[in-house]
Image (spheres, grey):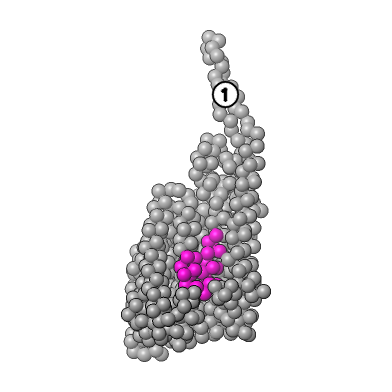
């Protein structure tokens, strides 16, 4: 049973991806057999000449606006991830960490917490997918292969059939497959105890999401995808070098080859590691995985990728990909503190956190695009989590993990709502979006509440987590107290920028000519669930309280 619970979170999304692929191949063969309609012959030329050749065959069109049942099949994997996370949480709270496959896969309280976060955010994103994809079809921006429910070349006007079959249809046809592979890679990164497998899983997320970022194959999206690949590959290369150095230090310390990258073994024998090699390796790992977490200096990919990816994918990238990468940093931090003492990682993480927060606040002040605004907000929140890790007290770690969950839920809701706003208004410029509450009250209310949650207002969980981070920082000593004071000032600047721009979008009259829009329940209920979960975490942790405390204990300095 333990092996099944540890394997299913990564295996279930891959199985769903395989089912989408097989369904696409089967429907592709069926589409090839669909009869085509011949256009009538052109009139006979004057003087009795030969009739013109028949025009090319035209495939019959199918309305792109309807939701397809296959779109909902992707909900299976988030439900499996949530179920496995809940069952593993019950096991580790009662019996401690569990493992399988000779320790290759392992679950402790931190693993269970991250699985619950990944499953919850993935549920919001996958449940929002059908309505988002239906809007893309209705706007003639997507048809898809039959994994999207529409055979190739059957999605729109004949004049555009060729371009769709050759470009957009394939990109959107692979959407579900890539999203499920993305979930599988993130879950593998969470459940593995081997630092080498962790690196492979995080690298796999880069490869998969690059195709999702560039799905529209426009100049802007392809540029964002290449920027994402280049910067994150540079970061992953640094993380690989750091992992190799840590492996070398472990072998020099007498740890067997099979266990030289095993996280529990390295934590238990960290005092034997060479300090100089470990210091260099940990620095490279923090910089490398920090690139995936949106921390400076390798952060530049984040706003471009999040602004060009489909809204549900942006929700996954901002809501959990950044957090999964930072969870890897938290694992390495335990090894570093045991080998080098707490001061090294405290200075390193606090410095990176303040630099990231300062940059995010400055860019939010000058931001004119609401999807990029949400991306820079992700940098702000990841820097707060890094600051909590720098403090390292039980309260700070628990608050940081709670912040990971609250940020994931709120940011997934905000990004999915922003995708609907983009479809409604046709622009991502803040200055061209006003009166959203007047035109679409429910959508405006959901987006506004999601931003309110990100601003840290009660009763949302980010209020409790930010309060806990601030309290722990001021209680940690003069050095971290000053760092926390500077961080709060920067957070206040980011708060003002985010609140001002969101109010400009929500308030005021609807633009002339825009009629009121009634959003369908299928587009709103996933966002409502996300806000409700974020509120529930802010009011009372309930049964998750013990899991959160034990997850913080896993990360405490030895």
The quadrant of the image that shows the C terminus is bottom left
The reply to whether residue 14 is visible in this rendering is yes
Q: Position of residue 228 (x, y in %)?
A: 40, 59
> 452 or 264, which is in the foreground?
264
Q: Position of residue 231 (x, y in %)?
A: 37, 61
Q: Position of residue 529 (x, y in %)?
A: 60, 68
Q: Residue at x 49, y 58 (%)?
A: 208
Residue 469 is drawn in which quadrant?
A: bottom left
> 549 or 501, which is in the foreground?
549
The region drawn magenta spans 181-202
The correct choice, above or below, for 58 with respect to 111 in the image is above
Tell me the residue that label 1 is attached to. 54
Q: Position of residue 43 (x, y in %)?
A: 56, 18
Q: Is residue 166 magenta?
A: no
The correct choice, above or below, for 213 with respect to 344 in the image is above
The correct choice, above or below, for 54 with respect to 327 in the image is above
Residue 36 is drawn in which quadrant?
A: top right
Q: Is residue 16 left or right of residue 351?
A: right
The reply to whether residue 411 is visible in this rendering is no
Q: Residue at x 51, y 49 (%)?
A: 171
Q: Residue at x 64, y 62 (%)?
A: 76
Q: Is residue 199 magenta?
A: yes
């Amino acid at each position: 049973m333990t092996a099944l619970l540890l394997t299913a979170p990564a295996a279930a999304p891959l199985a769903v991806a395989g089912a989408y692929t097989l369904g696409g191949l089967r429907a592709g063969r069926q589409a090839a057999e669909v009869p085509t309609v011949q256009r009538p012959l052109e009139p006979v030329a004057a003087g009795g000449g030969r009739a013109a050749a028949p025009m090319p065959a035209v495939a019959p069109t199918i309305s792109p606006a309807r939701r397809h049942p296959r779109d909902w099949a992707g909900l299976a994997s988030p439900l499996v991830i949530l179920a496995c996370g809940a069952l593993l949480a019950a096991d580790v709270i009662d019996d401690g960490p569990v493992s399988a496959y000779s320790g290759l896969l392992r679950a402790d309280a931190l693993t269970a917490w991250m699985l619950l976060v990944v499953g919850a955010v993935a549920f919001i994103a996958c449940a929002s997918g059908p309505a988002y994809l239906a809007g893309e079809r209705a706007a003639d921006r997507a048809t898809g292969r039959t994994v999207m429910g529409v055979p190739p070349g059957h999605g729109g006007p004949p004049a555009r059939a060729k371009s769709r079959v050759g470009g957009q249809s394939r990109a959107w046809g692979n959407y579900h497959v890539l999203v499920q592979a993305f979930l599988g890679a993130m879950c593998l990164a969470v459940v593995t105890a081997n630092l080498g497998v962790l690196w492979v899983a995080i690298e796999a997320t880069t490869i998969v999401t690059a195709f999702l970022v560039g799905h529209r194959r426009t100049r802007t999206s392809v540029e964002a995808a290449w920027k994402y690949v280049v910067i994150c590959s540079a970061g992953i290369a640094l993380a690989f070098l750091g992992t190799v150095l840590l492996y070398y230090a472990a072998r020099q310390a007498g740890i067997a080859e099979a266990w030289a990258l095993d996280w529990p073994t390295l934590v238990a024998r960290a005092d034997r590691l060479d300090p100089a090699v470990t210091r260099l390796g940990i620095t490279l790992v923090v910089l490398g995985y920090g690139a995936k977490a949106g921390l400076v200096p390798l952060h530049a990919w984040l706003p471009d990728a999040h602004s060009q990816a489909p809204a549900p994918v942006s929700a996954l990238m901002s809501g959990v990909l950044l957090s999964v990468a930072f969870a890897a940093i938290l694992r390495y931090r335990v090894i570093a503190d045991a080998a080098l003492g707490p001061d090294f990682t405290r200075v390193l993480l606090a410095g990176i956190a303040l630099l990231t927060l300062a940059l995010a606040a400055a860019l939010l002040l000058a931001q004119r695009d609401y999807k990029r605004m949400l991306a820079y907000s992700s940098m702000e929140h990841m820097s707060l989590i890094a600051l909590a890790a720098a403090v390292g007290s039980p309260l700070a770690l628990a608050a940081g993990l709670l912040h990971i969950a609250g940020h994931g839920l709120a940011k997934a809701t905000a990004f999915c709502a922003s995708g609907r706003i983009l479809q409604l208004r046709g622009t991502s410029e803040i200055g061209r979006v006003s009166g959203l509450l007047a035109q679409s009250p429910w959508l405006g209310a959901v987006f506004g509440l999601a931003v309110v949650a990100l601003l840290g207002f009660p009763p949302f969980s980010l209020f409790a987590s930010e309060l806990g981070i601030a309290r722990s920082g001021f209680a940690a000593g003069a050095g971290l107290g000053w760092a926390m004071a500077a961080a709060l000032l920067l957070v206040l600047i980011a708060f003002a920028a985010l609140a001002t721009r969101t109010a400009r979008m929500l308030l005021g009259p609807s633009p002339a000519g825009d009629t009121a829009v009634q959003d369908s329940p299928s587009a709103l209920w996933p966002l409502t669930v996300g806000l409700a979960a974020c509120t529930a975490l802010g009011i009372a942790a309930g049964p998750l309280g013990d899991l959160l405390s034990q997850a913080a204990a896993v990360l405490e300095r030895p």
